[in-house]
Image (cartoon, rainbow, N blue to C red):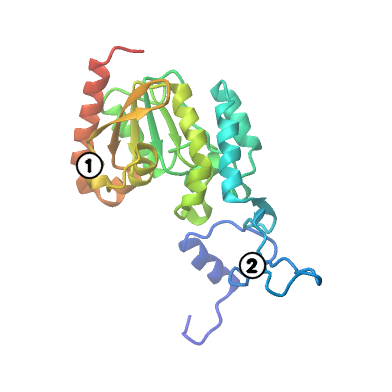
Amino acid sequence: MTPDSTPTVRQLLAFYLEAGVDCALGDEPVDRLSDPVILPVASEAPLSQPVRTIPAAVPTLRGDTAPAPEAAIHSAREAARTAPTLEVLRELLEKFDGCALKSTATRLVFADGNPQARIMFVGEAPGREEDLEGLPFVGRSGKLLDRMIGAIGLDRTSAYIANVIPWRPPGNRTPTPQETQICLPFIQRQIELVNPDVLVTLGNPSTQTLLSTREGIMKTRGRWFDYDTGTRVIRALATFHPAYLLRSPSYKRLSWQDLRSIAKALEQQVPS
C-alpha cells in the first residue's frame, strides 16, 4: 500500500486487531472530547448561581449510564459483605452493574481451581482468551503459570486462581483506579471466603492493590506480607506476573526463588 492510497476495510481491521482493538463497544461513535452534560438553569434562578454538572451517573462505553464511582464502590462493598459463600458472591457479581467493564466484556471471569486450596493466586485482570472462556489464566501466561506451580508440586486441583478485576478491560488496557476500587471489595471477600494459608499476588497491580504498597514489583517480589481479612491474618508473597516473565524471561530465576519460598511456607504451616 502506497502512502497516498486509501486503506481497505480489511487492512483497517487488520491494523486495529494488531493494535489490540478486538471488540466493538457500540453501534454509534461517541465523542469523548465533548463537554459534559450540563443541567439547565431555571429561569428564576439568580445569575450568580453556578451551573452544575450531573453527578448521579456517568456514561459507559456503550452509551448508557452507570452509577457514579462513589456510589458504585459503596454498592460493591455492601453486596460483597453479604455473600456467605463463593457461589453467592459469583451470583452477586453476575448481577452487579456498577462497573462499566461488565458491559464490554464477553463474560465474567470469576475463578478457577479448588476453593478448598491452601494457596490462592491473584492477578490483575483477564485477557482475551480468559474473556472468551470465562476462566482466569488460560492463555499463554496461564500455561506458564501452570508450569510454575507444577514445579512445586501444585496444579489447578490444589490451587485457587482469580483476578482483582473479573471483567476484561477493552483491548487489554490497564484498569483505571476507579474500576479497581469498584471491584476491590469482591476480591477481598473472595480471599476471605477461600481463606488460604498462603496468598500470592502476581505482578505489580495486584500486589499494590491487595497489599497496600506503592513500591514496585522489583522491591516487593520475594517479600512476605501480612494480609488481614478482618477475621484472620494470611501470609502473602508477591512475585512476577507470568505475562511479564514471557516478555522478560531472564527474571524466571527470581520467580523460581519465590516459588521455592512458597513451597517451604506450605510445608511449614499447619493446614487451617
Q: Which mark is residue 252?
A: 1
Q: SS at mark 1? A: helix
From the top left corner, tell me how far across and down residue 263 is, in percent.
24, 23
Q: Is residue 70 visible?
A: yes
> Residue at the location (70% across, 62% down)?
27
| Direction from residue 222 to residue 29 in the image, left or right | right
> Residue at the location (33% across, 46% down)?
204
| Direction from residue 224 to residue 28 in the image, left or right | right
Q: Amino acid at mark 2?
A: Pro
Badge 1: how crowded within 10 Å, few (<14), some, or many (20+)? some
- Foreground mark, 1 or 2, reads 2
Image quadrant where one finds the C terminus: top left
Q: Amino acid at mark 1?
A: Lys
- Residue occupying the far bottom of the picture: 4
In depth, the one of 188 and 78 nearer the eye is 78
From the top left corner, tell me how far across and down residue 60 is, in percent.
63, 55
Vertical side of 104 occupied by 30: above or below: below
What is the CA distance from the residue labelled 1 to the residue labelled 2? 47 Å
Vertical side of 142 occupied by 82: above or below: above
Q: Which mark is residue 36?
A: 2
